[in-house]
Amino acid sequence: MKKINIILGFILCMTYFNSNAQEINILEQKFPKHEIGVSCGLFAAPLIIPMYHGLFPSLNLSYYYNFNKHHAIGATLSFFYGGVCFFEKSHQDWNFLFESVILSPQISYRISYCQKKTINLYSVVSLGWKTPIAIKDDWVFNAVAPFPAFHVTFIGMRIGNQKNAFTIEVGYGTQGTAILGYTHKFISNKK
């Protein structure tokens, strides 16, 4: 009788630990697919026209779809106030040809290469178009057309929990050279 009680107790314990292990495994399989973010970048600049640059911080809105823990594709929309300038040798100063609000929609690819519990390191490449939408001088509006734009985040750091985090990025392009932001991942309770 004592052996049967021990065997039954052992079976109950194993059943309990097995069910807990399966619950933990199910929780680990839940992965946030959708992510939104907002950020502010300093010193926005494109590659195509080097003299075209941002005069004020850029505002960036982003959405990413995470395929897995390492790869994500998304869209980024950047706004900043910028201008085309030229250098006058006689005055040794920069003069602006025109100033405008710039809108830059881009497709982005992100790769995360180092993930810890509260810190994630990543890089991003974004390609798209840059379009002036509110030009200060009307005479130049017809002469300015949309042109290719890009952004590269050499290194980005996401600091926080799986759901909410702050981001710090160093890069070059339309989103800025130094970027601070916030992201939110939507975590589903479904399997």
Image (cartoon, rainbow, N blue to C red):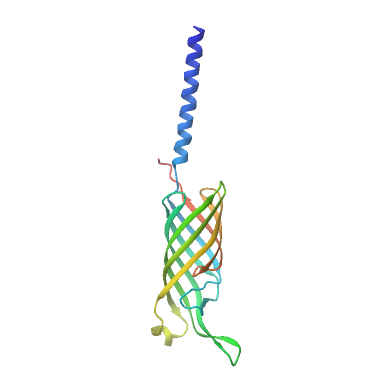
Placement of 182 over or under 49, stated as above or below: above
**Where residue 136 appears, x then y in whole percent?**
47, 82
Placement of 24 over or under 95, stated as above or below: above
Q: Nearer the viewer, residue 90 or 179?
A: 90
Placement of 20 over or under 114, stated as above or below: above
Residue appearing at x 51%, y 49% in the figure:
163
Residue appearing at x 48%, y 30% in the figure:
20
**Where residue 27 appears, x then y in whole percent?**
46, 39
Give the position of the C terminus as an image quadrant.
top left
Q: Nearer the viewer, residue 185 or 73?
A: 73
Q: Nearer the viewer, residue 152 or 84?
A: 152
In the picture, residue 188 is in which quadrant? top left
Q: Residue furthest bottom?
A: 90
Q: Residue furthest right?
A: 92
Residue appearing at x 44%, y 37% in the figure:
26
Q: What is the total number of numbered labels drawn onto the structure image? A: 0
In the picture, residue 103 is in which quadrant? bottom left
Residue appearing at x 55%, y 73% in the figure:
56
**Where residue 179 appears, x then y in whole percent?**
55, 64
Placement of 13 over or under 161, stated as above or below: above
Q: Residue furthest top?
A: 1
Q: Nearer the viewer, residue 4 or 71?
A: 71
